[in-house]
Amino acid sequence: MAHYALNINGVTHQVDVAADTPLLWVLRDTLGLVGTKFGCGVGNCGACMVHLGGLPTRSCMTPVSSVGRKKVLTIEGLTAQGDHPLQKAWQELDVPQCGYCQGGQIMTAAALLQETAHPTDAEIDDAMAGNLCRCAAYQRIRAGIHRAAEIAAKPGVKS
């Protein structure tokens, strides 16, 4: 076991885990942050997406020892009130079906919208290509991203 101080959602957490423990299991099992889901365990589906140092990262493939001082942002930390433009758009358009992959979808989309305020369909499809949805809600996910971009563009909206 090794000791790590992790900045997760703006809070420093002290954890004692093996160096090769995937960040996903530290988040879920050690810290109880269960919004980040286990999907495939091999980095193919995107259900475990978090932001690590501002970049979308598959937490199932990221050993805790590689995190260092980088900030980790999970779906729980996207906004304190759960009112991020993507979360608002997802609710407004009823984007998810089963919802299992949606935390990872939203985290990937949040990274996209930070880079590109008003992405095209092609930019959305490219950015979201690594996130699988067993319910095939891809058209609704794309519409949700477009709607979130509109919401974020309104004066006074923080994303």
Image (cartoon, rainbow, N blue to C red):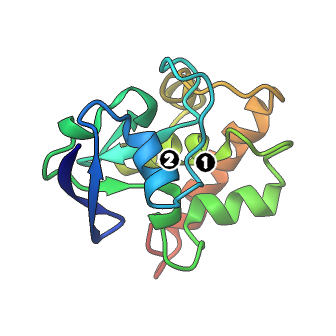
Q: What's the residue at 80%, 46% (across, down)?
A: 96
Q: Is residue 75 visible?
A: yes
Task: Specify whether 147 is left or right of 92.
Answer: left
> Which corner quadrant of the image does residue 128 belong to?
top right
What's the amino acid at mark 1?
Answer: Gly
The quarter holding residue 57 reads top left
Question: Tag 2: Cα neighbours inside 10 Å, few (<14), some, or many (≥20)?
Answer: many
| Relative to 117, residue 150 above or below | below
Between the C-alphas of marks 2 and 1, the distance is 6 Å
In the depicted structure, whether residue 126 falls above or below residue 105:
above
Q: Inspect this view and state whether residue 112 appears.
A: no
Under tag 2, what secondary structure?
helix
Quarter of the picture containing the C terminus is bottom left
Q: Is residue 152 left or right of residue 103?
A: left
Residue at 45% x, 41% y: name it: 24
Q: Residue at x 40, y 48 (%)?
A: 26
Residue placed furthest toward the front: 1
Where residue 95 appears, as percent x and y from the top left, is: 79, 48
To which quarter of the image does residue 13 belong? bottom left
Could you say where residue 148 lies in the image, as x and y percent from the top left? Answer: 60, 57
97 is higher (above) or lower (below) than 132? below
Residue at image mark 1: 103
Write down the residue under mark 2.
107
Q: Is 64 left or right of 152, judged from the image as shown? A: left
What numbered label is drawn on residue 16? Answer: none
Is the residue under label 1 in contact with that under label 2 (CB below 8 Å)?
yes
Indicate the amino acid at tag 2.
Met
**Dot 1: few (<14), some (14–19), or many (≥20) neighbours within 10 Å?**
many
Query: Tag 1, which secondary structure?
Result: helix
